[in-house]
Image: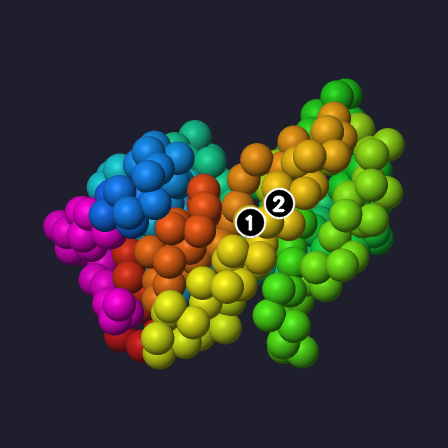
Amino acid sequence: MQIRKGNSTLGDVEENLAGIKQTVAEACSRAGRREDEVHIIAVTKYVSMETAERAIEAGISHLGENRIEGALDKWEKLQDKASFHFIGQLQSKKAKKIIGKYEYIHSLDRMSLAEELEKRLEDGNKVKCFVQVNVSGEASKAGLDAAEVIPFIQRLEGFSAIEVVGLMTMAPYEEEPEKTRGLFRELRELRDRVRALGQPNAPCEELSMGMSNDYAIAIEEGATYIRLGTSLVGNETNA
C-alpha cells in the first residue's frame, strides 16, 4: 500500500475518507471482522484548525493530537464535536493540562505518569488509557518492553481513575507493510493475555495500532483504533 499525501479541502478529505473506509472494509472482510469494530482517529498535528473541522464535517468522530499546544487549541474549539485522543509522549508535569479534556491517552508507559493522572482526577472521574508497548524494540520508540506490560498493569490495580482500555504500539515504517504483521500480532496476543487477567480497571479490549502506511495489516491483526494523518487530512507543514 502506498501512502497518499492527502488533501485538506472538505471535498478532498471526504474523498480520502471514502477511500480509507473502502480499505477498512476490505481488510475487515479478509479478517472476518465487522467494520464497526474499527475506529478511525484523524491525526491533526500537521494541519490547521480548519482542516480538523473539515475532517469532522466529513464524518470523523475521533481526533488525535500529540503536542500539548495544538491539543489544547483544538479541544477548546472542537470539544463538543469529537472524542479527543492524546497520542504522543506525555510528560507527567504537563499531564494536568489535558486531564479532564482528552478522553483517551494512548501513551501510558510509566508509573510516574499513572500517579499524576490518579492524583489529578477526582470525584470518580476516569481517563481511558492505552498502555504503550515498544513491540519492535527500537531504541527510538517509546513504550514498555512486552515483558514489562503485565507487571505494570497489575501495579495499576488500585488506581481508581485509570481504566486500561487497551494497548498501543507504533510499528517501524516499512516499504513493504506486510513486514509489520508480526509486531501487530504480538501486540494482539499480549492484549489477550492482559484481558485474561480479569483485572477490573483493565478490561483491555482495544488495540491502537496502524498508521497511514500499514493500517490494513493492523486491522487484519485486530486493530480497533487506527491513527491516520497524511492519508486522511494531508500535511500542511510542507504546503
Q: Residue at x 64, y 64 (%)?
A: 134
Q: What label sits on residue 188 in the rendered view? A: 1
Q: Are marks 1 and 2 in contact (CB under 8 Å)?
A: yes
Q: Position of residue 224 (x, y in %)?
A: 45, 42
Q: Residue at x 57, y 35 (%)?
A: 205
Q: CA distance from mark 1 to mark 2?
A: 5 Å
In reply to whether residue 147 is colored magenta, the answer given is: no
Mark 1 Cα within 10 Å, few/some/many (few <14, many 20+)?
Answer: many
Asked if residue 24 lies left or right of residue 78, the reply is left
For badge 1, the amino acid type reads Arg
Observer able to see residue 62: yes
Q: In the rendering, at what x and y percent does residue 228 appear?
A: 37, 56
- Farthest residue, direction top: 123
The residue under label 2 is which amino acid type? Answer: Arg
Measured from the top left, where is residue 152 in percent x and y? Answer: 81, 49
Q: Main secondary structure of the magenta part?
A: helix
Quadrant holding the N terminus: bottom left
Residue 87 lies, in percent from the top left, at: 55, 54
Residue 84 numbered mark, or none: none
Rendered image: mark on residue 191? 2
Q: Is residue 228 above or below residue 3?
A: above
Judging depth in this view, the residue of 11 and 141 nearest the camera is 141
Horizontally, residue 18 falls left or right of residue 207, namely: left
**Highlighted magenta segment, given as a residue range:** 1-23
The magenta stretch spans residue 12: yes
Left or right, 118 with reference to 65: right
* Residue in the image at 65% along x and 31% along y: 203
**CA neighbours of label 2 inside 10 A, class few (<14), some (14 to 19), many (20+):** many
Q: How is the image coloured?
A: rainbow
Label 1's element? helix
Q: Quadrant of the C terminus?
A: bottom left
Residue at horizontal 84 percent and vertical 53 percent from the top = 112
